[in-house]
Amino acid sequence: MSTPLDYTIVNSYWEKAESSILGPYVMDGFGFPASAGHFRFRGESRIVQKLVRQAHVDRASNVLDLGSGVGHWAEYFAQKFDKIVAVETSTSLYKTLVQRCSAYDNITPILGDVLSFEPEDHFSLIFLGGLLMYLNEGDVIALLQKLKSFLNPGGFILCRESTVRNGTVTLEGDYQAVYRSVPTYHSLFKTCGLSVTQTCLNKPYVLMQMGCEAIQVWKENVPENFQCLPFIGRMVYWGLRLGNPWITHLPSTMGMAFPELTNHFFLVEPSRETSPNP
């Protein structure tokens, strides 16, 4: 059994996280320009658009964005759906969320614990954009089972989670997270009475993660005074951009399990025998 996360440490990390687009993506500290985060978000938003279209989520729908961070996804959904409820636990990220969403009358930002939050509405789409990886297994199951009851008939939960190829890996230290494999997530969803409709590899994440892991090796082997991260980060970023998409296929053709971390979108719905009744 993996070591459980210490939520005090998890929350402390996010209270100190940079409120730029790189901070919530855990891409800061590698010398990347902000455009790297925006590039990844644009790529991810195209995946979300495709999945939501396949799920036939009506434009006149309520959307719950749980663990909203600085609000990029809340802003994205506000341009496509009628009402957005955006919940964030970190007070520092919440301030940026409020500022970003102030121009949208259809976003309700809420500062609160995502585990204890009790919605007043029902939703056609509940989005978890990298939340389950910061929860212990018991809380993942409890949260997903609770969220099912707040789905409209025909509603979906869309999760975006960092993954490993096999089993479960728990990071300890100042940054704590649980990286689960795709089969592990599928098993968790089944335990919660959820059926997986779509599983989609997050290719923009994989591309940028290749850069993060490569630069991390650079940082570990080059003295700090000679790392030149702003220069190296930009060079790596543009090299990945120019080499995309073929560069993402290079490791597998060479028999390499690189990058170590991947990321997947999971579109899930209540199993027929557990369909919600609002």
Image (spheres, rainbow, N blue to C red):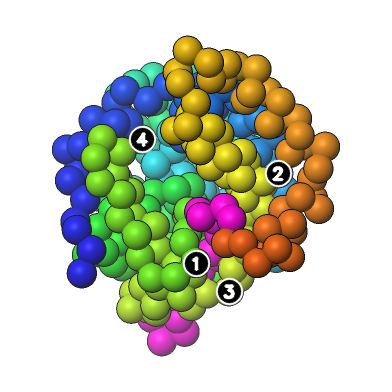
Secondary structure beneath disc 3? strand
Image quarter (top left, top right, bottom left or bottom right) of the N terminus: bottom left
What range of the chain is rendered magenta? 258-274
Secondary structure beneath disc 2? helix
Q: Position of residue 107 (x, y in %)?
A: 50, 33
Determine whether, in the image, residue 29 is placed left or right of residue 205. left
Residue receiving disc 3: 197
Looking at the image, can residue 20 be seen? yes
Residue receiving disc 2: 43
Neighbour class for label 2 at 10 Å: few (<14), some, many (≥20)?
some
Question: Distance between the Cα atoms at labels 1 and 2?
Answer: 22 Å
Q: Say which of 89 and 38 sits in front.
A: 38
Whether 187 is drawn above or below 108: the answer is: below
Q: Quadrant of residue 58?
A: bottom right
Determine whether, in the image, residue 185 is placed left or right of residue 264. left
Question: Distance between the Cα atoms at labels 2 and 4?
Answer: 23 Å
Indicate yes or no whether the magenta region holds residue 263: yes
| Amino acid at dot 3 | Thr
* Residue visible at 70% across and 44% down in the picture: 43
Q: Position of residue 17 (x, y in %)?
A: 37, 25
Residue receiving disc 4: 88
Residue receiving disc 1: 165
Image quarter (top left, top right, bottom left or bottom right) of the C terminus: bottom left
Secondary structure beneath disc 1? loop
Q: Earlier in the sequence, mark 2 or mark 4?
A: 2
* Residue visible at 62% across and 50% down in the picture: 206
Looking at the image, can residue 153 be seen? no
Q: Earlier in the sequence, mark 2 or mark 3?
A: 2
Q: Say which of 163 and 271 sits in front.
A: 163
